[in-house]
Each structure stands twice: as structure tokens, then as C-alpha cells.
Image: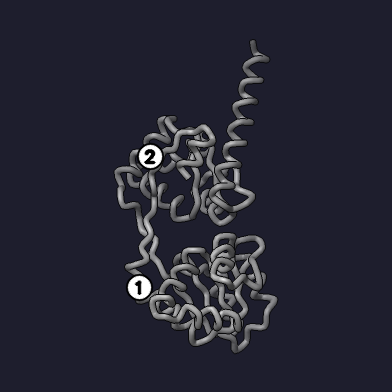
Amino acid sequence: MAELVRRLGGNPYIAPTVSLRTEESGPEAERLASALLEGVDWAVFYTGIGVRSIFEVAGRLNQANALLEKLKTAKVLSRGRKSLRALRDMNRPPDFTAEPSTTSGVIDVLRDASLENSTVFVQTPGGMAGPLSDMLASSSARLIHGSPYRILPAEDPEAVSRLVNNLLEGAIDAITFTSPPAVNNLFIAADESGQADDLATALGKHVVTASIGPVTSMAIRENGVEPALEAESQRMGGLLQDLSRFLAKMIDNEQKTTSQKE
């Protein structure tokens, strides 16, 4: 992403607000892989990392081919583009994709299915959203749920604090968010220093806030900010391309306004 920013003429400012741990969730990943190997009626994948982590575990167990065959007998649902691409890479394109790419989209697909006495596997990046859990409970389906990785706070909290200060001081023109935890962790850090409200104001008025997709946009809005743009492709490259065009148009409009005043 940083290299693409440079190619587009920008200066990348790198400050991760999250860290991922797959090795710390080894037993959980094995549990999920084993559940799929036993066979399920529905397999719902929320994230590309989740898909790849489960297949990696199956590979270490010499069960990658067996996992693929089991998934071919199940109905596979992808929540978003990343899980869609990962499933395609694993030679098991999903039968269904959520529209929109949110939990409500997942619910819409499952609500139209007959889930009674079915085993439904759901991989999420964290806890399961209440509405989905309630819907599955009311359907009498047997639920298998978990995440093969953990999302943790940033490894360098001081870098996140510097990021907050730079955003407030106007040293950064635009910020991209690619996941809800990235948004929430930034605001948690700002809240700890009493700057959360100021950060929301800065991201809403002075900084171009760009979101990779609807789920991330929802997290941005929940923190009091309306994103300036949401990537149509829901891909990181597409996000930066959209941001480049947005900034170019904004600069052009500012120059036209200045010329008219002169």
C-alpha cells in the first residue's frame, strides 16, 4: 500500500493500529478445521485471513484436500470480497455472497435457506454479531463459531499516539481504514488521552477519511465520523485509487475557487 501511495504521488505515513496473531490461536484454528472436516451443511466465511488460516492448519495436518472436498458438499457463503477471493484461491468459490457485504447481508442469505436441523459453521474476525446469533438460534440450527486468529492492539502504542497528534495538528491529509478494529483502536487510543472528540472532529472536517467497505464505514460512523469515501471495489488498491481521484478533484475545486476569488 505504501508503494502504491508513492506511485500515485503521495507520501505514506505508516502507523498500524492493530496487530494480528495467528500463532496464538492455533488450538482454535485446529478446532475450526476439524469441525469442517467432520462435515457441515453451511460454511460462512467473513474474512480472507480466516479462510487462509483454516486451510493452512488443514495443510499442516495433511488434510487440505480433504477439507476442500468437505466444503464442496456444503453450501459456502462469503460475506465480503476478501473471503471471496481467498475461497477462489483455494479452489472453492462460494455458492453465495452477502449483499451488502455485512452481517445483514449474511442474514438475508441464511434467512432464505432452510436451516432446521442444519449444522452452520461461521468464521468471524471476533465475536458474532447479536442479530446473526439470534437468527441462527431461532432457526434451530447447530452453530459452530469461532475465529482462527486474534485481533490485538497495535504493537507500538506510541506510534498510534503520534498518529492521533499528527491528525489533530493537520500534518496528515488523508487516512485509510481497512477494518473496524483499526478504527476502534485508534479512537480507544485517542480516548485514553482525552482526544476522542477532537479526533472525530478532525476526521470529519479536516482529514479525508477513506473506508475500504461498508463494515468499516459502519465502525467509522459509530465513532462519530462520516467517511468522505468508500471504495467501490472493497480492495486496498482500489481504495487508494479512489482516494487519489478524490484528492485530485478536491485540489482542482480549491484551485478554481481561489482563481474565482482573485
Residue that carries the numbered disc 2 in the rendered image: 163
Query: Residue placed farthest to the top in the image?
Result: 262
Q: Relative to the observer, which residue lies in front, 42 or 128?
A: 42
Query: Residue type at mark 2?
Result: Leu
Whether residues under marks 1 and 2 lie with C-beta atoms below 8 angstroms apart, the answer is no
Disc 2 residue crowd, few under 14, some 14–19, many 20+, Cα 10 Å = many
The quarter holding residue 256 reads: top right
Quadrant for the C terminus, please. top right
Residue 12, image x and y in percent?
A: 44, 37
Q: Nearer the viewer, mark 1 or mark 2?
A: 1
Q: Secondary structure at mark 1?
A: helix
Q: CA distance from mark 1 to mark 2?
A: 32 Å
Query: Residue placed farthest to the bottom in the image?
Result: 117
Is 151 drawn above or below residue 12 in the view shown?
A: below
Please give the name of the residue rendered at 57% of the width and 70% of the height, measured from the top-left corner. Answer: 131
Residue 159, image x and y in percent?
A: 33, 43
Disc 1 residue crowd, few under 14, some 14–19, many 20+, Cα 10 Å = some
Please give the name of the residue rendered at 33% of the width and 47% of the height, measured from the top-left corner. Answer: 192
Query: Residue placed farthest to the right in the image?
Result: 112
Label placed on residue 220: none
Please give the name of the residue rendered at 64% of the width and 49% of the height, measured from the top-left corner. Answer: 232
Query: Residue type at mark 1?
Result: Gly
Residue that carries the numbered disc 1 in the rendered image: 26
Please give the name of the residue rendered at 48% of the width and 84% of the height, measured from the top-left corner. Answer: 37
